[in-house]
Amino acid sequence: MSKGVHNRSIVIAVDGPAASGKGTLARRLATHYGFAYLDTGSLYRAVGQAVRAGGGDPADKEAALAAAKALDVSRIDEQAIRTAEAGEAASLVAVMPEVRAAILHFQRDFASRPPQGEPGAVLDGRDIGTVVCPGAQAKLFVTARPEIRARRRWLELKNSGADVTEAQVLDDIVERDRRDAERAASPMKPAEDAHLLDTSDLSIEAAFGAAVAIIDKALG
Ligand code: C5P
């Protein structure tokens, strides 16, 4: 089966900035529709983390590209990639077009041929609706005010035992947003046909309900 135009799988693109709630939402949507789920941020995190683990600098192009080419998605260490350092390393390797190109094929393949033969896939990231799957049948751009996102991420980190202040988390988030939005290669931005969903004042349940309403309408 070929990719792109002849893609029979239904694709839901969920983009948005760090800690917007898009991951939780995307996972629930995948369960709700019986679709496969891919967290594309985990790919960039795994590349950044692999460079760090090898003693390299994630801003070093050669090291980052080598790690991207060697990426084995079945062996991603979920715990190691969830740290604030891995998030930072991810956003450094993600500015490199070569790194993005190296993992683009895997993402498109996942979307057009979900691994367990599911009828569709939910992908979350920064450029799913604009670059990875511009033909996605439903596109959401999930946002929340930076202070709200920082609070959510800080609580998560604190609960997992990390020693960080809320102000530090807010600084990191603002810096990561800036880097993701200003980079030349696939910058984070809503696709023209994306539906914006601001979760600042919504519970997880309310955000999920709003997303399902948008998607049901888009899928007809
Ligand atoms: O979503 P998450 O915080 O795990 O993403 C980590 C980083 O990976 C982001 O800050 C961004 O720089 C990069 N990323 C990206 N494109 C994607 C997903 C993530 O550039 N589709």
Image (cartoon, grey):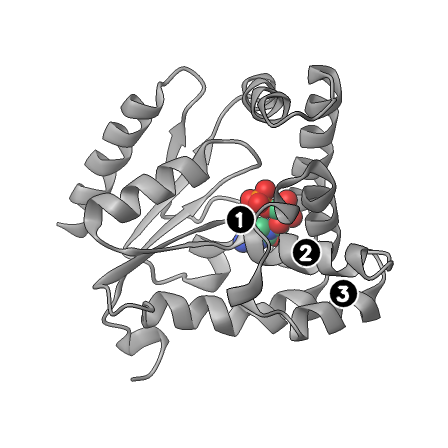
Q: Position of residue 61 (x, y in %)?
A: 82, 66
Q: Hey, what amino acid is under mark 1?
A: Arg
| Mark linked to residue 64 | 3
| Mark linked to residue 126 | 1
Ligand 1 near label 1 (Cβ, under 8 Å)?
Answer: yes
Residues at marks 2 and 1 touching, judged by CB atoms closer than 8 Å = yes
| Mark linked to residue 94 | 2
Question: What secondary structure is found at the residue carrying circle 3?
Answer: helix
Image quadrant occupied by the N terminus = bottom left
120 versus 208 height, above or below: below
**Distance between the Cα atoms at labels 1 and 3?**
19 Å
Q: Position of residue 11 (x, y in %)?
A: 30, 58
Nearer the camera: disc 1 or disc 3: 3
Q: Tag 3 or tag 1, which sits nearer the N-term?
A: 3
Ligand 1 near label 2 (Cβ, under 8 Å)?
Answer: yes
**Distance between the Cα atoms at labels 2 and 1?**
10 Å
Q: Viewed as shown, does residue 65 lie left or right of 103?
A: right
Q: Quadrant of residue 116?
A: bottom left
Q: Position of residue 160 (x, y in %)?
A: 60, 28
